[in-house]
Amino acid sequence: MFFSFAKIVSQYTSQSGPGEINMFNAIIVFFKTALVEQVVNDPFWAAVGLVGQVVFGARFVLQWIVSECKKRSHVPTSFWFISVAGSLILLVYSIHIKNPIFILGFSLNTLIYLRNLHLIYIHETKREETVIEKGED
């Protein structure tokens, strides 16, 4: 089911003359193979992965826009909600493609984002300024 970039490069290396690696052609073949295997053969899960990446990336666009409006670096609470949503979508996709590295990474990320939201909730309920905040700005 899965393909290997190294395998494709080695095929093109053996087809090339001595010492020549046609890396550009290997990259093109790699992406064509990826498109067929992951998008054409499994469009639903390809869409899930793409949506997850878009949601996950949107958090940075949001943070940038908010920082520009405030004229200083700022991470809004919605950044963490979007992080959780994107991370969960990508976790589900990682489980589908059976990639243990991404499963572990997105599992840990989700826990960290949830912890940040919990800390924000606790802080807002207490409405106390911490020692660190007193020194901010």
Image: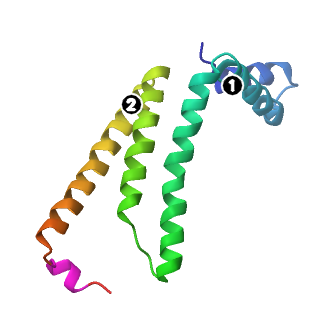
Q: Quadrant of the C terminus?
A: bottom left
Q: Amino acid at mark 2?
A: Ile
Residue drawn at x 20%, y 78% as measured from the top left: 132
Q: Which residue is mark 1?
A: 34
Q: Which residues are magenta?
A: 129-135
Residue 81 locus on image (x, y percent): 37, 52
The magenta stretch spans residue 134:
yes
Residue 122 horizontal/vertical position (percent): 15, 62
Residues tagged 1 and 2 counted as in contact (Cβ below 8 A): no
Instruction: Please state, as top left, top right, bottom left or bottom right, where the N terminus lies in the image.
Output: top right
From the top left corner, tell me how far across and down residue 41 is, in percent.
Answer: 67, 15
Residue 32: name its quadrant: top right
Separation (CA) of disc 1 from disc 2: 20 Å
Q: Residue at x 53, y 51 (%)?
A: 57
Q: Which residue is mark 2?
A: 103
Say above or below: 89 vs 61: above
Q: For the residue labelled by badge 2, is the local secondary structure a helix, a strand or a loop?
A: helix
Q: Is residue 24 left or right of residue 49?
A: right
Classed neighbour count for the residue bearing mark 1: other residues with Cα under 10 Å, few (<14), some (14–19), many (≥20)? some
Q: Residue at x 78, y 24 (%)?
A: 13
Residue 20, labelled with which disc? none
Q: Residue furthest top?
A: 1
Residue farthest toward the right in the current orientation of the protein: 17
Label 2: few (<14), some or many (≥20) within 10 Å?
Answer: many
In the image, 130: left or right of 115?
Answer: left
Q: Residue at x 20, y 85 (%)?
A: 134
